[in-house]
Image (spheres, rainbow, N blue to C red):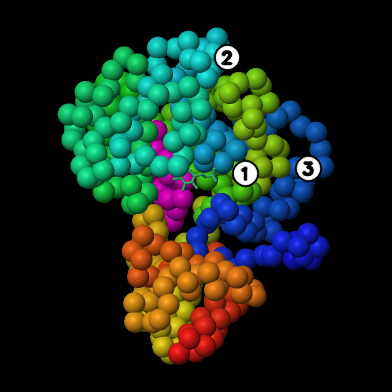
Amino acid sequence: MTDFYAKLGVKTVINAADSYTMIGGSRMPAEVVEAMAQASRHFVPLDELQLRVSARIAELTRNEAAVVTNGAAAGLAVATAACMTGTDESLVRSLPFPGCLKNEVVIHRCQRNGFDMAITQTGAKLVEIGDVESTFAWQLESAIGERTACVMYFTSTQYSRGALPLEEVIRIADARGVPVVVDAAAQLPPVDNLWRLTQAGASLVIFSGGKTLCGPQSSGFIVGREALIAACRLHVGARISIGRPMKVGKEEMTGLLAAVERYVGLDHAAVKNRHEALVSSICSGLQSAGYDAERAYPGPTGQDYPLVKVDLSRTRFSPEKLATILRSGDPSILVALPWDKRYVVINPLHLREDEAAIVVSRMQEILASEA
Ligand SMILES: *Cc1c(COP(=O)(O)O)cnc(C)c1O
């Protein structure tokens, strides 16, 4: 398959960084590809397929209900729209100029991020609470009113500093009958996040299909309460709604189902051991090459897996420079650059053993050439 990319003149990348959308999210295992291939050979009623696939995903993830979306960002738009309109068909048709009373989404200021547009494209207005350092319960309480469609919450540890704990948000919103929507796009592993957040009382929880789950890149799903999921269903699929440009194809639905089936059935202890072994061999390889490398934990958004953190402060190049050299080399290697500017980070999540060996030997060459 590299031939296909080569013919187009597009270079493939070794992913030592993360489930980055810009390099394709993840790789699909054979069973996912096969499910998509099988799905592609027939016509099928899309709404019926959506219902059956969703029911199976709900069962596999121990949730009351689920709906397949075209990615987690689409999940944000669909969940927001659902909280605004409920199952009222005329309101569904009114977006993005909501004829509905409920057109406000409460969000922590410290959790604002690039995916905000997925929320506001529905016509919803963001109502911010708190500041970048802290948020108080009374701020959430006074932000919630008759126009509140939902409270949006991002569980990534990137956004947890300064935010109210999810449990407190749920308690306050619940008491006012307002749903809490959680974006947990990349919050796997642990696998139990698939049910833990809804069990904790979140009304809707959004996952990306194309990240840790290794499903189709343009897939994702929402799990949660049946009544709200029923409203979500009015905003996905081939029917006319604000979600129509985010339609989910039959191949994505079946591929996602195969991916979820595979993921929940994995030997997660073995996966964890593989990550630890990979991290430990990368660390020792880099250390013997003269790098200041050590195991770090948890994953970049708080997931349950380790990373390799390489401190470059005693070398003559900056993390950006090393990352650029790796990226422009052959093969091209992408490493992560965390907010702390002293480090590059190597992430084992999408790295094969043979690729890890290439990363180590390339970094060894680069350090030797700089010395
Ligand atoms: C990746 C990500 C998304 C978007 O996921 P897609 O499946 O690529 O649409 C949304 N929210 C968060 C927090 C993410 O990390």
Can the viewer see residue 155? yes
* Side of 131 where 258 appears, left or right: right
Q: Which residue is mark 2?
A: 93
Residue 295 place in picture, x, y as percent: 36, 74
Distance of label 1 from label 2 (alpha carbons) = 24 Å
Looking at the rendering, which quadrant does residue 246 occupy? top right
Q: Judging from the image, what secondary structure is the residue with disc 1 in? A: loop
Q: Between disc 3 and disc 2, whose residue precedes?
A: 3
Tell me the residue at 61%/55% (across/down): 24
Q: Judging from the image, what secondary structure is the residue with disc 3 in? A: helix
* Side of 98 where 12 appears, left or right: right
Residue 40's disc number: 3
**Quarter of the image that includes the N terminus:** bottom right
Residue 306 place in picture, x, y as percent: 40, 67
Distance of label 1 from label 3 (alpha carbons) = 15 Å
> Of circles 3 and 2, which is in front?
2
Q: Which residue is mark 1?
A: 218
Q: Which residues are magenta?
A: 181-196
Asked if the residue at label 3 sits under 8 Å from ligand 1, the reply is: no
Looking at the rendering, which quadrant does residue 71 occupy? top right
**Quarter of the image that includes the C terminus:** bottom left
| Mark 2 neighbour class, 10 Å CA radius: few under 14, some 14 to 19, many 20 or more | some
Q: Between disc 1 and disc 3, whose residue precedes?
A: 3
* Image height of 53 relative to 270, above or below: above
Distance of label 3 from label 2 (alpha carbons) = 30 Å
Q: Amino acid at mark 3?
A: Ser
Tell me the residue at 48%/74% (across/down): 322
| Mark 3 neighbour class, 10 Å CA radius: few under 14, some 14 to 19, many 20 or more | some
Q: Judging from the image, what secondary structure is the residue with disc 2 in? A: loop
Tell me the residue at 47%/79% (across/down): 282
Q: Amino acid at mark 1?
A: Ser
